Image (cartoon, helix red, strand yellow):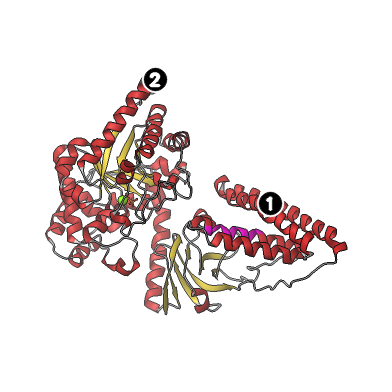
């Protein structure tokens, strides 16, 4: 048995035999053409471009009808490459000036452009080399009139193992016997990963040289939840994963029945269930429909992969579109939490590279240093609040001093006053909240609460800062422990502090989506859990099987415990009403 850790590109668990996709090792020979043939060679290349464009048009239509227009943009990106003079004119020049065959001229140009992509700092741009390679492959096929079909030999449901998969390959997997895929290279932002998620196909990428360690037919467990693959698992592990897989699919099916039932325990204690969103994703009607509101819009993602910050109008359009999906239910827009691992390419003057970015200029700290960014975003949010039916809430990330909230309030007040004089008035009172995710904010909550309308606990960061364990560092991943007594006690401290002052408190970190943690959080009296949409029904179903009094007892018992093991034991064995 071999376990290889990669990057989770798309959630879910798949188990099946490996189907190895061999790398394309076609060597393109340097071939010169007689000068009298250049016109004919150019024509051949142009025909291949035209044919490739027609193929892409067809794929675009297919993806649009299969997955929606958001995903057909991937194909559109390929069409733009095919129109790009950087590639097309360069190839034609090589054919004309150096009398090279179209195939060879294309291969040289692709190599040159790829090395330019590889030198770019931003991962997203570096990954565009895969799109270029995909377009080049299509052009080669149309020049040589030979189609490669990497998946033609799949005879049984399999897990694809490849050094790399192109987006066009990924689209084709939908109709094949494919359970999931794993690749050596690729990142979370690659189009291949984006497509896998949209097809709900489990996928793990960034596995280094895993494809060399696997043979055709090896049994593979692909765990897209944690980004791990297990090659030829031991029987016990295989059994556990099979159970988990069955549990997930049964749960998903039966969960659909509870979607219209109230979010409450068996003894009628209500907990509002919200969802978290990345604004780059379309809010699906289904997701918004079943939640009590939007608890965290991670707006920083709009600022990424670009050199200029998004303007007021662009942000307004995004927030408005998102908020409208929630009808009258509240929508919480977080001020951009840039910094930390959410690195920005924005031209913010000559910023020093931070040696401890998670402790550095992140979230509200960055906004207070670059107030024009804050002004633009708050203006867009205030405009949204004047336009939509739902209450709009603004949430401040990475608060460590009450003073930071007061600074935001000043800006908010100024903007609301300015807009009001122009008749742009929020339809509901604009609420302001603080994320409590830094220990100093938790411990000085009494100074923070008078400044805010609500509080949301960011457990992802709270755990990181409480235990001093970098949340993205693999070396210390085993120390990142949501069950640490300090974590539980701090959460209790925050919740009780809020309850005393009558301020609503939510949890929007991943802990809210951990089924085992729900009895404890409910027992502490949490008002709102904001969940990842994928976990929504699972958590709702747990909530609906709980007895509030038992949860309160469990929470009190857990708070007295001094080790994570004891706490985990307690929460793992907590009975649900229908168990
Ligand atoms: C958190 O820290 O728990 C949180 C919700 O914010 P993020 O994960 O975006 O830092
Ligand atoms: Mg956070």
Q: Secondary structure at mark 1?
A: helix
Q: How many marks?
A: 2
Q: Estimate the x, y position of residue 123 in percent, counting from the top left.
A: 48, 58
Q: Estimate the x, y position of residue 256 in percent, counting from the top left.
A: 41, 49
Query: Magenta part of the protein: which range?
Result: 126-135
Residue drawn at (40%, 78%) of the image = 235
Q: Secondary structure at mark 2?
A: loop
- Is residue 62 inside the magenta stretch? no
Q: Estimate the x, y position of residue 384 in percent, counting from the top left.
A: 41, 31
The C terminus - image quarter: bottom left
The N terminus - image quarter: bottom left
Residue drawn at (72%, 59%) of the image = 91
Q: Residue furthest right?
A: 36
Between 560 and 23, the one nearer to me in the picture = 23
Kindly report the secondary structure that dominates the magenta region of the rendered protein. helix
Residue drawn at (79%, 69%) of the image = 32
Between 422 and 529, the one nearer to me in the picture = 422
Q: Residue furthest front?
A: 350
Left or right of residue 490: residue 515: right
Q: Estimate how packed mark 1 is, as few (under 14), some (14 to 19) or many (20 or more) residues with alpha carbons within 10 Å.
A: few
Instruction: Give the residue pinned by disc 2.
Output: 423
Q: Which mark is residue 492?
A: none
Instruction: Give the residue pinned by disc 1.
Output: 85
Left or right of residue 532: residue 15: right
Between 108 and 221, the one nearer to me in the picture = 108
């Amino acid at each position: 048995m071999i376990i290889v850790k990669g990057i989770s590109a798309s959630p879910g668990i798949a188990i099946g035999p490996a189907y190895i996709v061999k790398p394309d090792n076609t060597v393109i020979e340097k071939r010169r053409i007689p000068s009298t043939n250049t016109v004919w060679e150019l024509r051949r290349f142009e025909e291949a471009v035209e044919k490739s464009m027609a193929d892409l048009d067809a794929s675009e239509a297919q993806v649009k009808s299969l997955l929606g227009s958001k995903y057909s943009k991937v194909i559109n990106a390929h069409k733009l490459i095919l129109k790009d003079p950087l590639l097309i004119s360069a190839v034609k020049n090589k054919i004309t000036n150096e009398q090279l065959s179209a195939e060879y001229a294309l291969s040289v140009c692709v190599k040159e452009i790829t090395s330019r992509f590889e030198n770019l700092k931003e991962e997203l741009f570096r990954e565009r080399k895969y799109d270029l390679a995909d377009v080049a492959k299509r052009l080669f096929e149309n020049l040589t009139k030979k189609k490669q079909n990497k998946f033609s030999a799949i005879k049984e449901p399999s897990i694809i193992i490849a050094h790399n998969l192109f987006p066009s390959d990924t689209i084709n997997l939908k109709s094949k016997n494919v359970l999931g895929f794993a690749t050596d290279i690729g990142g979370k932002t690659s189009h291949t990963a984006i497509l896998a998620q949209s097809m709900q196909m489990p996928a793990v990428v960034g596995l280094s040289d895993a494809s060399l360690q696997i043979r055709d037919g090896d049994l593979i467990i692909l765990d897209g939840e944690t980004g791990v693959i297990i090659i030829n698992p031991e029987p016990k592990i295989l059994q556990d994963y099979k159970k988990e897989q069955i549990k997930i699919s049964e749960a998903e099916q039966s969960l659909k029945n509870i979607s219209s039932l109230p979010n409450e325990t068996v003894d009628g204690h209500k907990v509002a269930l919200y969802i978290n969103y990345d604004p780059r994703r379309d809010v699906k009607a289904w997701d918004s429909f079943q939640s009590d509101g939007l608890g965290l819009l991670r707006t920083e993602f709009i600022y990424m992969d670009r050199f200029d910050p998004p303007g007021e109008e662009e942000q307004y359009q995004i927030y408005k579109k998102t908020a409208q999906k929630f009808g009258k239910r509240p929508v919480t827009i977080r001020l951009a939490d840039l910094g930390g691992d959410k690195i920005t390419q924005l031209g913010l003057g000559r910023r020093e590279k931070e040696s401890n970015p998670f402790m550095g200029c992140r979230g509200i700290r960055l906004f207070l240093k670059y107030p024009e960014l804050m002004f633009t975003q708050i203006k867009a949010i205030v405009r949204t609040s004047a336009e939509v039916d739902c209450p709009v809430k603004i949430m401040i990330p990475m608060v460590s001093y009450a003073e930071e909230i007061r600074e935001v309030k000043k800006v908010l007040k100024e903007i609301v006053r300015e807009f009001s004089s122009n008749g742009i008035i929020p339809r509901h009172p604009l609420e302001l909240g603080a994320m409590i995710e830094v220990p100093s904010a938790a411990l000085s909550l009494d100074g923070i609460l008078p400044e805010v309308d609500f509080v949301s606990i960011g457990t992802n960061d709270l755990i990181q800062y409480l235990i001093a364990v970098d949340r993205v560092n693999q070396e210390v991943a085993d120390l990142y422990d949501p069950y640490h007594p300090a974590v539980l006690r701090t959460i209790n401290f925050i919740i009780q502090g809020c309850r005393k002052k009558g301020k609503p408190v939510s949890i929007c970190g991943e802990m809210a989506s951990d089924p085992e943690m729900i009895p404890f959080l409910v027992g502490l009296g949490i008002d709102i859990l904001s969940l990842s949409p994928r976990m929504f029904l699972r958590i709702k179903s747990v909530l609906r099987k709980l007895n509030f009094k038992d949860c309160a007892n469990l929470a009190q018992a857990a708070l007295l415990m001094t080790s994570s093991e004891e706490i985990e034991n307690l929460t793992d064995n907590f009975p649900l009403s229908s168990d």
